[in-house]
Amino acid sequence: MKPTHITDDSFQTEVLDSKIPVLVDFWAEWCGPCRMIAPVVEELAKEYDGKLKVAKVDVDSNPKISMDFSIRSIPTLMIFKDGKAVDQIIGAVPKRTLVDKVSQYIK
């Protein structure tokens, strides 16, 4: 399963209304650390398929979501559960860090 690309228009349906937790990667094409963490985010999408939805938001193309969640530096990864932001990781972190965070929110 590949990460879903989310837009300002699809955020409500894809993230806030999701029945399973969602990891949202706020990124931009020009961001070096975003490119470094992208393969890890894709691995999580495959490994947690069915338990966790993984989504990507291009902050340049979707400024409304970025403003709504006060995204000031990227990459920022946020975990949403039951329509609420429950956790946040800023910066390119090791896979183990992401797995530890995500595993707290999945069954």
Image: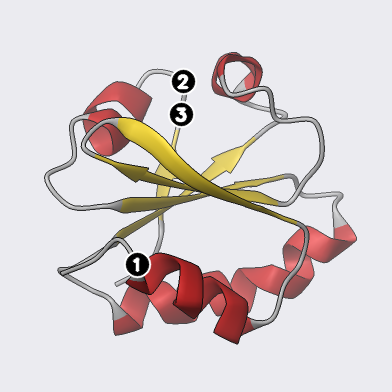
Q: Label 3 amino acid?
A: Thr
Check the image and name the residue furthest to the front. Answer: 104
Q: Position of residue 93 (x, y in %)?
A: 72, 72
Q: Residue at x 69, y 81 (%)?
A: 94
Q: Secondary structure at mark 1?
A: loop
Q: CA distance from mark 2 to mark 1?
A: 27 Å
Instruction: Say if 7 sits above or below 79 in the image.
Output: above
Tell whether 81 sits left or right of 18.
right
Q: Secondary structure at mark 3?
A: loop
Q: Nearer the viewer, residue 88 or 16?
A: 88
Tell whether 30 sits left or right of 62.
right
> Label 2 belongs to which residue?
8
Report the colour scheme: secondary structure
Q: Which mark is residue 7?
A: 3
Q: Position of residue 37 (x, y in %)?
A: 69, 71
Tell whether 1 sits left or right of 107.
right
Q: Position of residue 28 (x, y in %)?
A: 74, 45
Disc nearer the start of the sequence (3/1): 3
Q: Secondary structure at mark 2?
A: loop
Contact between marks 2 and 1 (CB within 8 A): the answer is: no
Instruction: Say if 84 sits above or below 64 in the image.
Output: below
Q: Nearer the viewer, residue 45 or 71?
A: 71
> Label 1 belongs to which residue?
104
Contact between marks 2 and 3 (CB within 8 A): the answer is: yes
Q: Nearer the viewer, mark 3 or mark 1?
A: 1
